[in-house]
Image: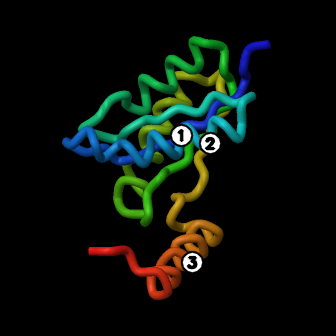
Amino acid sequence: MSQQRALILFAHGARAASWAAPFERLRDLTQAREPGVRVVLAYLELMQPRLPEVTAALIADGISDITVVPVFLGQGGHVLRDLPLMVDELRAAHPQAAITVVEAAGENEAVLNALSDYCVNALVHPSPD
C-alpha cells in the first residue's frame, strides 16, 4: 500500500552541510515513529531540497495529505511571512492536495518544556568544556 500522507520538516538551511545533521536525525527519529507516513526535510534557503520541489515530488508520488512542520525556534519573518506565501502558492499550484502548516516547533508548549528540562538539567549535569 502506498503512503497517502507526508510530514515535511521545514528548516532554514545554512551554508555548512554539517548544520543539517540534527534535522536529519529528527527526520529519521520521526520516520521511525511513523512508518506509514513519509517524513522528509525541506529548506527555505542555502540548502536543497526546497519546499516547492519537495511538495511537487510528494504530490507526483500520489501523496495528497501534507503537513508542514516549521522546525524553527521562533516565529520570525520566515515563519510569519515567507512560509505562508510559499504555502499559498503551493496550494494554488496543487489544489488536489491538502497542505496544512502547524505552529513553529519553538512555539509549542511541549517543545519549550523539553528545552527547559534540558536547560535545568545542565545545572545538575554540566557538559565538560
Residue designated by label 3: 117
Determine the CA span between mark 1 and mark 3: 22 Å
Give SS at disc 1: helix
Q: Nearer the viewer, residue 18 or 45?
A: 18
Crowding around mark 2 (Cα neighbors within 10 Å: few <14, some 14 to 19, many 20+) is some
Q: The residue under label 1 is which amino acid type?
A: Arg
Of the two numbered discs 3 and 2 on the same chain, state the one appearing first in sequence. 2
Determine the CA span between mark 1 and mark 2: 5 Å
Left or right of 60, for residue 54: left
Query: Residue 30, labelled with which disc?
Result: 2
Residue 108 higher or lower than 38, as above or below: below
Residue closest to the far right: 1
Give SS at disc 2: helix
Q: Badges 1 and 2: C-beta atoms under 8 Å apart?
A: yes
Residue 110 higher or lower than 14, as above or below: below
The image quadrant where one finds the N terminus is top right
Residue designated by label 1: 27
Q: Badges 1 and 3: C-beta atoms under 8 Å apart?
A: no
Residue 110 point in image, percent of width and height = 65, 69
Q: The residue under label 3 is which amino acid type?
A: Asp
Name which residue lies at 63% across and 36% down. Answer: 31
Left or right of 91, for residue 19: left
Q: The residue under label 2 is which amino acid type?
A: Thr
Determine the CA span between mark 3 and mark 2: 21 Å
Name which residue lies at 53% across and 59% down. Answer: 105
